[in-house]
Image (cartoon, rainbow, N blue to C red):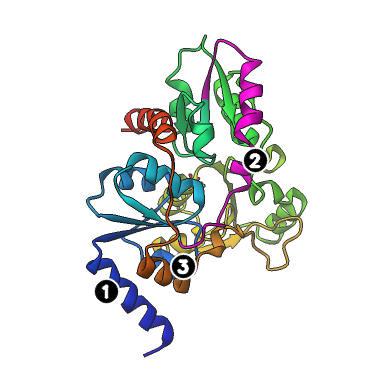
């Protein structure tokens, strides 16, 4: 039996013993997606966390996602294989700076992308993800002034769809802002039979050449339903595992980034997760996500609003 299989066996044994659930994000390595009880985007993962009956939630993703699971399950233990698995978007919006920013715009309601810290969520009216951003924004009357944080690219994209002029925080995802439109066009020329699809966290020039724009789940659904056989995909390459599983007869080419050496674009934070770390984390029930009662109470409301609107 290979060491990897042994790890998988041990993880499954511990999971049963501890009544744990493993929630993995689409962007983690394939083996960590395959071992999960549920694999999905942050909306699906939050929905799953909200209804789980497990005593222990193991979140194989990044810190803000595990925090979200804790906020909606304060009485449960939530653990993350590597506490250093952060997020450039969350880092781009420190709570104190955001409080100053928000104070400049009285009469505005705040929509924050789920990719932010729990502290920022305490200053938020409704949280959104890329899967439901349009729906959340449209749930406000047109005259309501809005702040959208922290992803300016997603905010700009939603502004362009709705004709709104939401005030945007100046943040971006280090994976999605690095796609090179020149290299993408070159690749499209080499593969004229391929369709280029992109995530709305990408910059505008990249979105302008995309045939379809959507969240990870929307992109996955799109390629599954499409008659096309080949796609160039501009989002973190972890999603290609689910695309290949859903459509074994189709070809998925990761879109190139400005500085990619491997021909794909990975999130180094997501890739901090590993089977080995998952095993150690589950065994020791550490590292654990902890938040003050006050933060949980305040941050819960905008997440529950999002879950209600997304039903
Ligand atoms: O919402 C998520 O999970 C992320 C980070 C992207 C997406 O589109 O699903």
241 with respect to 206 (left or right): left
Residue at position x 59%, y 11% in the image: 106
Could you say which disc has been placed on residue 304 in the image? none
Task: Say few, some or many: other residues with alpha carbon within 10 Å of mark 1 (under 14 / 14 to 19 / 20 or more).
Answer: few
Tell me the residue that label 2 is attached to: 207
| Residue 63 image offset from top left, x and y in percent | 50, 50
How many numbered badges does the structure rendering display?
Answer: 3
Check residue 63 for magenta coloring: no
Tell me the residue that label 1 is attached to: 13
**Which mark lies nearer to you, 1 or 3?**
1
**Which mark lies nearer to you, 1 or 2?**
1
Residue placed most toward the observer, 135 or 90: 90
Helix or strand or loop: what does disc 3 sit on?
helix
Residue placed most toward the observer, 278 or 204: 278
Check residue 108 for magenta coloring: yes
| Residue 256 image offset from top left, x and y in percent | 69, 58
Give the mark, 1 or 2, whose residue is nearer the N terminus: 1
Q: Is residue 160 above or below residue 231?
A: above
Could you say which disc has been placed on residue 30 in the image? 3
| Residue 64 image offset from top left, x and y in percent | 50, 46
CA–CA distance between discs 1 and 3? 20 Å
Helix or strand or loop: what does disc 1 sit on?
helix
| Residue 298 image offset from top left, x and y in percent | 42, 29
Give the residues drawn in magenta, as a range.
81-110
Residue at position x 56%, y 60% in the image: 237
Give the mark, 1 or 3, whose residue is nearer the N terminus: 1
Q: Residue at the far bottom: name it.
A: 1
């Amino acid at each position: 039996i290979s060491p990897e299989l042994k790890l998988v066996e041990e993880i499954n044994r511990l999971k049963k013993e501890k009544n744990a659930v493993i929630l993995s994000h689409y962007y983690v390595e394939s083996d960590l997606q395959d071992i999960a009880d549920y694999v999905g985007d942050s909306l699906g993962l939050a929905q799953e966390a909200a209804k789980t009956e497990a005593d222990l939630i193991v979140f194989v993703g990044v810190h803000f996602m595990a925090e979200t699971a804790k906020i909606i399950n304060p009485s449960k233990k939530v653990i993350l294989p590597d506490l250093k698995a952060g997020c450039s978007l969350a880092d781009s919006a420190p709570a104190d700076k955001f409080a100053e920013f928000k104070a400049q715009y009285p009469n505005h309601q705040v929509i924050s992308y789920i990719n932010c810290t729990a502290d920022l969520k305490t200053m938020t009216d409704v949280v959104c993800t890329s899967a439901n951003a349009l729906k959340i924004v449209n749930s406000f009357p047109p005259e309501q002034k809005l702040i959208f944080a922290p992803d300016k690219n997603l905010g700009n994209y939603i502004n362009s769809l709705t004709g709104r002029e939401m005030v945007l925080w100046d943040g971006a995802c280090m994976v999605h802002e690095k796609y090179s439109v020149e290299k993408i066009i070159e690749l499209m020329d080499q593969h004229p039979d391929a369709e280029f699809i992109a995530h709305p966290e990408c910059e505008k020039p990249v979105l302008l050449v995309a045939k379809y724009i959507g969240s990870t789940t929307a992109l996955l659904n799109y390629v599954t339903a499409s008659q096309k056989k080949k796609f160039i995909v501009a989002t973190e390459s972890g999603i290609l595992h689910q695309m290949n599983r859903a459509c074994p007869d189709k070809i998925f080419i990761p879109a190139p980034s400005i500085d990619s050496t491997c021909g794909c674009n990975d999130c180094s934070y997501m890739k901090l997760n590993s089977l080995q770390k998952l095993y150690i984390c589950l065994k020791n029930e550490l590292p654990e996500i902890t938040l003050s009662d006050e933060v949980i109470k305040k941050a819960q409301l905008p997440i529950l609003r999002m879950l209600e609107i997304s039903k």
